[in-house]
Image: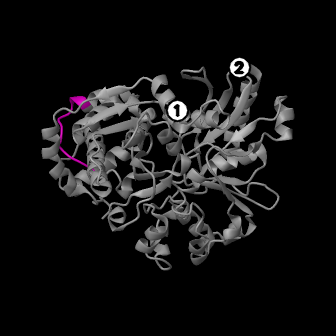
Amino acid sequence: MAKKVLAFDFGASSGRAMIGEYDGKLINVTEIHRFSNDTVVTGGRMYWDVLRLLFEVKTAINKAVKEYKIDAIGIDTWGVDFGLLNVHGELLSNPNHYRDERTVGMPEETEKFISPSALYALTGTQTMRINTLYQLYYLAHYRPELLAQADTMLFMPDLFAYFLTGAKRAEATIASTSNFLDPKTKQFNTALLEKLGIPTRILPEIIQPGETYGMLSEELCREFDCDPIPVVAVCTHDTASAVAAAPAEGDFVYISCGTWSLFGTELSAPVINAESERIQYTNEGGYEGTTRFLKNIMGLWLIQESRRQWIREGENVSYADLEREALAAEPFKCFIDCDAPEFETAGDLPNRVREFCRVTGQYVPETRGEVMRCIYESLAMKYKLNFNALREVSDKAFTQINMLGGGIKDTLLCRLTANATGVRVVAGPTEATVMGNIAVQLIALGELSSWRDARRVITDSTPLKVYEPEESAAWDSAYSEYVKYLGKSAKN
């Protein structure tokens, strides 16, 4: 009988539980539970409601064991964030959200102890204030009493695995988002943490994708009236799971599309040199020890938060409405740098776009459609910028981009990406993260023979859509105007 696995995929605004089964030819996926992931703001701080999320996890497991006989469980989440446990294994506080502003200025403060170049040479990681390193630095210097109580730090997927099994371990791909993992040794750089005053006693053991955290605890087995079930350490960083599912062979470029756009390629070893530092590319872990050489780009957050603002203003506008209005607007009238600091946090994104354009001496978009056109084209231009840089630093002539994840439902962005970069875009699978999660579980159970076999099956199991480039000459002409505004900020 074919084995069934339960995959949990947590995003920044929602989560879902999916049953995966391999029938010998295709991987079939069934959603059994979906839930919101709502940020909680209190006392001026942003938190994840982790115990509410645990309730949803338990709800899904209970349903899965009642309606299916599941053989394994796997969990993937966003990166960088973590929870702290005390010596009794109790959660000390709700994990902070990476967009919380407590880390503003922390990268600059760490320069008192280590230069940005020296830090990059050690970790090969793009400087972003959201990184775990800067969150821990903040705690060590501004909330030392909290760290003093901490016995173990667990990244978000590891924390959920701990709640299910009692095992305190860190899976390698999620650990690689921390900015203190050595990408060559695949171990935490304890000397770096000590230099920054961060206690290393809180670090858990690192395990690899495909290993098992442990079995579902006796307490939970009694609660669900089920036999012990292994909780498999999949590629627990959601982007790592998505890339593991990429329907590609050989050299390829991917964009994992969601709240963030993760733009990169898959390599056999990390790249850490002056050029990779200049373009601020990150070396994160992938399946079987591969390197995800990538850049974090602000992504669909810009569109999502703009829509939320318009809804707050009483305009009940859908994503389809915004796409249609963007298409109706005149192209190439203004651009933003998607990664400018004013676009990082929640709030009135449309007016921040207008202010950026005003301060930088551009046409100021007035209508919703003009704002959206500006955002869409700026994202596509950012992809073009990174595509060109990746070709140069890797010395590889990439001719195709694979766009993965839920963001590919935005067909306009896929079309504009092909037009901007001048190469074919292959969009799919939409459920790349879940498929990668399921595939690693099936390999661990012996249902799939290898990662190569898994990618072949995933390609056969999911529809792909191809976008050929059009109007590339117009995009090339507008690109020189776009680059004028890189590194700009309305706050400067």
Instruction: For label 1, count other residues whose C-alpha is less than 10 Å away and answer few (under 14), some (14-19) or many (20+).
Output: few
Left or right of 188? Residue 470 is left
Q: Nearer the viewer, residue 400 or 147?
A: 400
**Range of the magenta residues?**
327-336
Left or right of 300? Residue 226 is right
For mark 2, give the secondary structure.
loop
Q: Quadrant of residue 254?
A: top left
Majority secondary structure in the magenta region: loop
Residue 1's label in the rendered image is 2
Residue appearing at x 42%, y 38% in the figure: 304
Q: Nearer the viewer, residue 418 or 299?
A: 418
The residue at the far bottom in this view is 112
Residue 446 rendering spot, x and y as whole percentages = 66, 33
Q: Compared to 433, does 272 lie above or below? A: below
Q: Nearer the viewer, residue 356 or 31?
A: 31
For mark 1, give the secondary structure.
helix
Q: Is residue 477 on the magenta stretch?
A: no
Q: Which residue is mark 1?
A: 453
